[in-house]
Image (cartoon, helix red, strand yellow):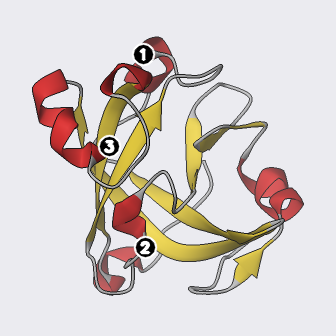
Amino acid sequence: MLNPEINRCYSFDEIKSEYGLHRSYAFRNSRNEITAFVLNKEMNPSIADYLSNTELNILVAKGKYQSEANVKRLLTNREYPVFIKEGTNEWRYIGVYWCAEKITNRLAIAPHLKGVEVQLAEIVCVLRFSRVSNAMKSGLKLAS
């Protein structure tokens, strides 16, 4: 079992073997449950300063796996490991985050598009995550 270390980079295959089958913005297991998030800095400006931010606002664009029905399967009030893309086949583990909220209201999504070259019509939702404190992580199993 992969027990990721903060700030260590992992390959796509390492993450896939531990967390699931499909990747778009997230890995899913065979039951189509989201098990981990993999993020790109260009699409998610809030992760650029992840060391000092305790919250991440993740834009979920429309796509093959990012339908509204799939996003509804995402559980709020649940912890997820988060990896950010650093380079080709290089994903940095930044910790465990609590999915606090799914923002689907178009007016509430609009402010999150600042600095991103994407249209509002292309976004399914914004996911608001909060970093899990070290005290909460003790004994946490990262994979579903």
Q: Comparing marks 1 and 2, which lies closer to the viewer? A: 2
Who's the residue at 29% across and 44% down the image? 113
Secondary structure under tag 3 reads: strand
- What amino acid type should be assigned to the residue bearing mark 1? Glu
Residue 50 seen in render: yes
Q: Which residue is mark 2?
A: 48
Task: State the mark number for residue 127.
Answer: 3
Neighbor class of circle 2 (other Cα within 10 Å; few <14, some 14-19, many 20+) is some
Above or below residue 121? Residue 77 is below
Who's the residue at 66% across and 25% down the image? 31
Neighbor class of circle 1 (other Cα within 10 Å; few <14, some 14-19, many 20+) is some
- What amino acid type should be assigned to the residue bearing mark 3? Leu
Neighbor class of circle 3 (other Cα within 10 Å; few <14, some 14-19, many 20+) is many
Task: State the mark number for residue 77.
Answer: none
Q: CA distance from mark 3 to mark 2?
A: 16 Å
Residue pushed farthest left? 107
Above or below residue 75? Residue 128 is below
Q: CA distance from mark 1 to mark 3?
A: 13 Å
Task: State the mark number for residue 68.
Answer: 1
